[in-house]
Amino acid sequence: MSSHIIIKRNLIIFHRPGEWSDIYAKILQDYGMGMAIRPKLKRELGFTYRHHKGLVPNDYQSLGGVNHHYEDQVHLDFYSEQAQSWFQLKYLNLSST
């Protein structure tokens, strides 16, 4: 199963929350359990995360057209482009290291 991550300006969306869980565990390993405190995560790494129910189209279409369903997602909200770029380079390129 391939990853399904959407990157927008100041926002990264994980359509598979397990992928975020793996990265979050790596952050805690790299920076310590203090990063489990959201204000510290925001202050030191420049983002916060939130669990979200996103409306997405189904993989199939019914006779009436496209149907949608809600899926569990994790959204990362970034407070600067620099913080988002750093995060992408350090944590979204893990498979290439």
Image (tube, rainbow, N blue to C red):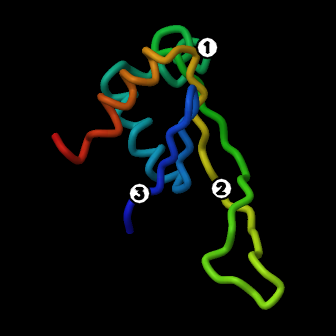
Left or right of 50? Residue 17 is left
- Find the distance from the CA under tag 2 to the CA under tag 1: 23 Å
Label 3 residue SS: loop
Tell me the quarter of the image containing the N terminus.
bottom left
Amino acid under disc 1: Pro
| Side of 9 relative to 93 (left or right) | right
* Residue identifier under label 1: 39
Quadrant of image for the C terminus: top left
Query: Mark 2 — residue?
Result: 72
Q: Looking at the image, is mark 2 or mark 1 earlier in the sequence?
A: 1
Cβ atoms at labels 2 and 1 below 8 Å apart:
no
Of residue 46 and residue 31, the one placed in the foreground of this image is 46
Work out whether mark 3 precedes mark 2 in sequence or the reverse, and give the earlier one.
Answer: 3
Q: Identify whether 56 is placed above or below 29.
A: below
Q: Which amino acid does label 3 sit on?
A: Ser
Label 3 Cα crowd, 10 Å radius (few <14 / some 14-19 / many 20+): few
Mark 3–mark 2 distance (CA, rounded to whole Å):
14 Å
Q: In this view, does 20 lie above or below 26?
A: below
Q: What residue type is labelled 2?
A: Asp
Q: Which is more foreground, mark 1 or mark 3?
A: 3
Seen at 73% across and 52% down, the residue is 53
Q: Residue furthest top?
A: 43
Q: Upstream in the sequence, badge 1 or badge 3?
A: 3
- Pointer 3: what residue? 3
Q: Residue furthest left?
A: 97
Whole-percent x and y of residue 85? Answer: 39, 23
Quote the CA–CA distance across marks 1 and 3: 28 Å
Residue 70, numbered label: none
Q: Residue 22 location in percent, x, y?
A: 39, 45
Viewer-side label of 3, 2: 3
Element marked by disc 2? strand
Residue 19 sits above or below residue 10 on the image: below
